[in-house]
């Protein structure tokens, strides 16, 4: 829906523990130092041990301006810590970009929602106004927890002119799907580096995998 009231984190249940997949850029959670891989032990003093994911989300979300208290454990540390985060309206902007030096564009994708491909294309076209040549792109997918499959395909297609991006295989013939890249004349052909880390999940892995398999991009990260 474009925005929600909360602190700005993607969470999931991993091995029965409520785990942060990634904080959303420039949100209260991000500013409070919450990191990918953090385990949420308590919400408002209540243990998350027997809590469902839906219950946890409902307890963390809430009206703008109201604080929520969390007890967290960083993945590399032994001692939990408490943090009070003031909720805000969390906008879902999925793509941001800036020119790091003439002709070289840094683009950060924080998620894959309905607006990701149009936002990505807009950043590229804005950069090329006045006949500027694009010499290289750094595509940052670190801590991007994924999102819509269709957007993963479309983002990959921006940088590919042909070939298979991803396929779905099931027992029955009707479950088989193959997504191919199309050459629409506006594809970006300059050198490409993709930044990834342990928080790059789902749709991010599809994009990184497709660009790597077609030898279209150099992957940097873990």
Image: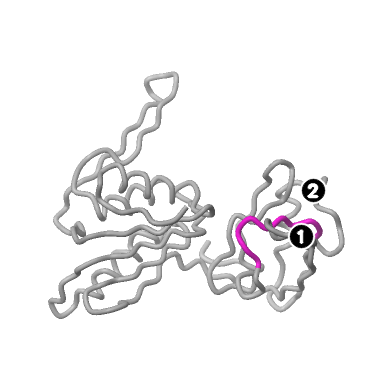
The residue positioned 32% from the left and 77% from the top of the image is 100
Count the numbered circles shown.
2
Q: Tell me if residue 35 is in the magenta stretch.
A: yes
Residue beneath disc 1 = 59
Mark number, residue 51: 2
Q: Residue furthest top?
A: 172
Q: Quadrant of residue 43?
A: bottom right
Q: Quadrant of residue 97?
A: bottom left
Disc 1 from disc 2: Cα separation = 10 Å
Q: Range of the magenta residues?
A: 34-42
The residue positioned 44% from the left and 56% from the top of the image is 221
For label 2, the SS is loop
Q: Are marks 1 and 2 in contact (CB under 8 Å)?
A: yes
Whether residue 174 sits left or right of residue 69 in the image: it is left
Q: Nearer the viewer, residue 91 or 156?
A: 156
| Upstream in sequence: badge 1 or badge 2 | 2
Q: Position of residue 67 (x, y in %)?
A: 76, 74
Q: Quadrant of residue 29?
A: bottom right
Q: Position of residue 64 (x, y in %)?
A: 68, 75
The residue positioned 21% from the left and 74% from the top of the image is 103
């Amino acid at each position: 829906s474009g925005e929600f009231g909360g602190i700005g984190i993607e969470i999931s249940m991993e091995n029965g523990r409520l785990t942060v997949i990634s904080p959303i850029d420039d949100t209260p959670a991000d500013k409070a130092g919450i990191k990918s891989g953090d385990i949420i032990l308590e919400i408002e003093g209540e243990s998350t041990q027997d809590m469902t994911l839906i219950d946890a989300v409902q307890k963390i979300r809430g009206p703008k301006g109201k604080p929520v208290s969390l007890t967290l454990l960083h993945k590399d540390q032994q001692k939990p810590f408490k943090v009070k985060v003031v909720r805000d309206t969390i906008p879902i902007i999925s793509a941001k970009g800036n020119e790091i030096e003439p002709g070289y564009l840094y683009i950060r994708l924080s998620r894959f929602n309905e607006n990701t491909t149009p936002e990505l294309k807009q950043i590229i076209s804005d950069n090329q106004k006045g006949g500027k040549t694009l010499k290289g792109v750094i595509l940052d997918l670190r801590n991007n927890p994924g999102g819509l499959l269709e957007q993963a395909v479309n983002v990959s297609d921006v940088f590919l002119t042909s070939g298979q991006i991803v396929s779905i295989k099931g027992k029955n013939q009707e479950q088989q799907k193959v997504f191919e890249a199309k050459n629409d004349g506006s594809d970006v052909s300059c050198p490409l580096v993709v930044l990834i880390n342990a928080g790059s999940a789902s749709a991010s892995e599809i994009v990184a995998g497709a660009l790597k398999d077609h030898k279209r991009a150099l992957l940097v990260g873990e």
